[in-house]
Image: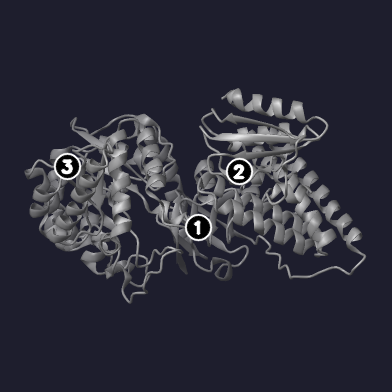
């Protein structure tokens, strides 16, 4: 059986499933008998004391080897010592007569809500710590022993709903081979820790705890996001080889990470990064530009539409961190499958063909205007350019540009400073825009190709649906021809074009993209080293021939076979 | 009493109370380590201590509660008011204000 998820920390592992259930303590609204409040308060105080000593032990164990992880438990002790939490717990039991576990749950829930509403995402993220401490207290009140991941059997692939900070901090690093979680995306706590520890991890695997049994052999391919349950011998061997290969390649590639990307015949290639946060820490020398700054996080992590000032602050932060490197801000790409809790969006039968992204912005003009105002005002602080997603026609482009002009006029009247020459460009991801790339190039300052959506729309296949995944072919001759058309059209007009879809970070595709003329690759940080290493081995003249030949092949399979046999060096 | 003033609902206008206004100068603001340092120092005093973010005209919160303090999201440049009431109130206000004015050693 094969399961699919999002690869959030690269690598390949062969191991045995270790099912880890963070216990969920059901707490019912219950009250203690009148007159026994004091007794129950004593038991709560004992639980607080025990929790504190558990945390002390955990801290002491980590202090020497990993002082950073010890800090997590220091933060948890800080929560336990929070005067107001303690006072409220006391009041809940002694005055309101709540049962200790009900008191703990209600007080912590209050603080989780309070902290969760703070605008600063770093503070809001501390709700994970509050939940963790709350769980610890509830467990102690239930009289259960602490369960954690500090001692695992060899080659364990931890399978969990999600991991708490105290789980990842104490995880047995010598024996953990991989992590699979039901919850979470690339920005989840588990994903960040897994990448930091270089543990292969796949997140967002639906119902994995119900499907996989404890001790089952698994192949975890956190390069593709594929999990093979009970693999046969052949698959196991292949996994071991792939894991080896990955490790070697990674070690080799890391030598290239901080160097400029140059091909074997000395052609300079620009490397961009894709970010989905205003706090990124990619070393300055590793990249040349921010090719895709997704702004959805501002909308999704908030409980209200982000204001102009909030957005401006965030955009300024990105420009500041990019230290003068160009930043391509993509306007809101939401709707369809991605929804906002505070905004009612009608349910659509066909969300990917629905009223999403730019289309949604056209409908909600005030939302669009706020973002454009914030982006333009940010342009006074650094080289920012604005990019529109889901452009399907020249009308879309003209309408978006008109909105930019109108906002510029507003800002001029208000005497707000902004860069008059802020570049305006588009994502090319709808085939209709790709086919008329020459006309698009007339209208815009630059373009970036979103290969994921482009392939999805071109092949009419949902890549997240396992049933249709085989029809999603991002390296098919059809795709290569379309990409070639786009690159040529922009180069002929002398306008920059990049790829910011997954294909740009795919080492297998690099030779084709370079061969089709691409000189700007933008990808997530984790792909940089490998792509630079691959590019260093490519001769662009030979790559051009390879691309020409592949465009004439009949199927994606033939393309891949041709590439495997003719690695141009 | 503690409950009442911590939630900003109680009457805290007390003529005996010491108060001082100052400005947050460190880059992080009252987040992360500076927030922890502030609470740690506050806890060394017996007095009841509050801090109020004057920028947002919000309520005074218990300075010995890290979570309340974080929830205020007090950033760089914000004006704050510290109050203390109790046996060591003068020193509490003086030392806490000094910690802020030193910029938490950032």
Q: What residue did someone put label 2 on?
A: B70
In this rendering, the label closer to the viewer, 2 or 3: 2
Crowding at label 2, few (<14), some or many (≥20) Cα neighbours within 10 Å?
many
Can you give x and y, in whole percent of width and height, for residue B40 in the image? 72, 34
Dividing the image into 4 quarters, which one contains the C terminus of chain A? top left
Q: What residue did someone put label 1 on?
A: A184
The Cα atoms of the two marked residues, 3 and 1, are separated by: 35 Å
Which dot marks residue A496?
Answer: 3
Sequence-wise, the earlier of marks 3 and 1 is: 1
Tag 3–tag 1 contact (CB < 8 Å): no
Quadrant in the rendering for residue B106: top right
In this rendering, the label closer to the viewer, 1 or 2: 2
Secondary structure under tag 1 reads loop
The Cα atoms of the two marked residues, 1 and 2, are separated by: 25 Å
Secondary structure under tag 2 reads helix
Secondary structure under tag 3 reads loop
Of residue A28 and residue A556, the one placed in the foreground of this image is: A28
């Amino acid at each position: 059986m094969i399961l699919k998820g999002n690869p959030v920390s690269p690598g390949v592992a062969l191991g045995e499933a270790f099912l880890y259930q963070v216990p969920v303590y059901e707490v019912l609204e219950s009250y203690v008998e009148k007159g026994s409040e004091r007794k129950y308060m004593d038991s709560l105080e004992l639980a607080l004391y025990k929790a504190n000593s558990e945390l002390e032990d955990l801290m002491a164990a980590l202090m020497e080897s990993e002082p950073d992880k010890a800090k997590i438990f220091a933060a948890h002790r800080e929560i336990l010592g929070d005067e107001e939490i303690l006072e409220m717990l006391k009041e809940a039991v002694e005055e309101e007569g709540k049962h200790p576990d009900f008191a703990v749950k209600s007080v912590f829930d209050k603080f989780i809500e309070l902290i969760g509403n703070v605008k600063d995402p770093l503070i809001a993220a501390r709700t994970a710590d509050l939940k963790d401490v709350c769980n610890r207290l509830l467990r102690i009140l239930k009289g259960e022993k602490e369960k954690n991941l500090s001692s695992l059997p060899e080659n364990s692939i931890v399978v969990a709903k999600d991991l708490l900070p105290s789980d990842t901090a104490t995880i047995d690093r010598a024996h953990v081979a991989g992590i699979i979680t039901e919850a979470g995306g690339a920005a989840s706590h588990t994903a960040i820790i897994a990448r930091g520890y270089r543990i292969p991890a796949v997140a967002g695997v639906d119902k994995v705890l119900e499907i996989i049994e404890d001790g089952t052999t698994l192949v975890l391919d956190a390069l593709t996001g594929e999990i093979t349950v009970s693999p046969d011998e052949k698959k196991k061997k292949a996994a071991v080889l792939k894991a080896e290969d990955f490790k070697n390649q990674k070690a080799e590639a890391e030598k290239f990470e901080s160097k400029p990307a140059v091909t074997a015949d000395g052609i300079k290639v620009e490397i961009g990064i894709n970010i989905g946060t205003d706090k990124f820490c990619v070393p300055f020398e590793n990249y040349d530009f921010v090719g895709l700054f997704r702004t959805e996080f501002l909308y999704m992590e908030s409980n209200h539409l982000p204001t102009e000032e909030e957005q401006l602050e965030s955009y300024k932060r990105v420009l500041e961190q990019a230290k003068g490197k160009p930043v391509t801000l993509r306007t809101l790409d939401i709707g369809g499958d991605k929804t906002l809790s505070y905004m009612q969006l009608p349910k659509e039968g066909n969300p990917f063909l629905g009223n999403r992204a730019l289309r949604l912005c056209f409908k909600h003009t005030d939302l669009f205007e706020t973002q454009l105002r914030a982006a333009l005002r940010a342009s006074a602080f650094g080289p920012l350019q604005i990019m529109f997603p889901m452009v399907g026609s020249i009308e879309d482009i003209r309408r978006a540009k008109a909105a930019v002009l109108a906002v510029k006029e507003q800002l001029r009247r208000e005497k707000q400073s902004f860069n008059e020459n802020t570049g305006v460009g588009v994502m090319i991801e709808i085939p209709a825009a790709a086919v008329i790339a020459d006309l698009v190039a007339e209208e815009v300052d630059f373009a970036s190709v979103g290969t994921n959506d482009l392939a999805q729309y071109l092949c009419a296949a949902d890549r997240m649906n396992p049933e249709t995944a085989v029809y999603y072919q991002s390296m098919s001759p059809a795709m290569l021809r379309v990409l070639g058309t786009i690159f040529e059209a922009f180069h002929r007009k002398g306008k920059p074009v990049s790829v910011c879809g997954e294909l740009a970070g795919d080492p297998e595709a690099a030779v084709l993209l370079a061969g089709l003329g691409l000189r700007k690759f933008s990808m997530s940080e984790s792909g940089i080293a490998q792509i630079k290493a691959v590019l260093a081995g490519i001769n662009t003249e030979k790559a051009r021939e390879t691309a020409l030949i592949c465009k004439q092949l009949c199927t994606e399979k033939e393309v891949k076979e041709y590439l495997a046999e003719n690695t141009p060096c | 009493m503690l409950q009442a003033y911590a939630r900003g609902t109680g009457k805290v206008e007390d003529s005996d109370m010491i108060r001082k206004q100052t400005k947050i100068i460190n880059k992080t603001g009252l987040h992360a380590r500076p927030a922890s340092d502030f609470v740690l120092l506050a806890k060394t005093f017996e007095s009841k201590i509050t801090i109020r973010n004057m920028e947002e005209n919000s309520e005074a919160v218990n300075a010995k509660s890290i979570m309340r303090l974080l929830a205020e999201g007090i950033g760089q440049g914000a004006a704050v008011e510290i109050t203390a009431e109790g046996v060591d109130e003068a020193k509490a206000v003086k030392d806490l204000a000094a910690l802020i004015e030193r910029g938490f050693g950032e």
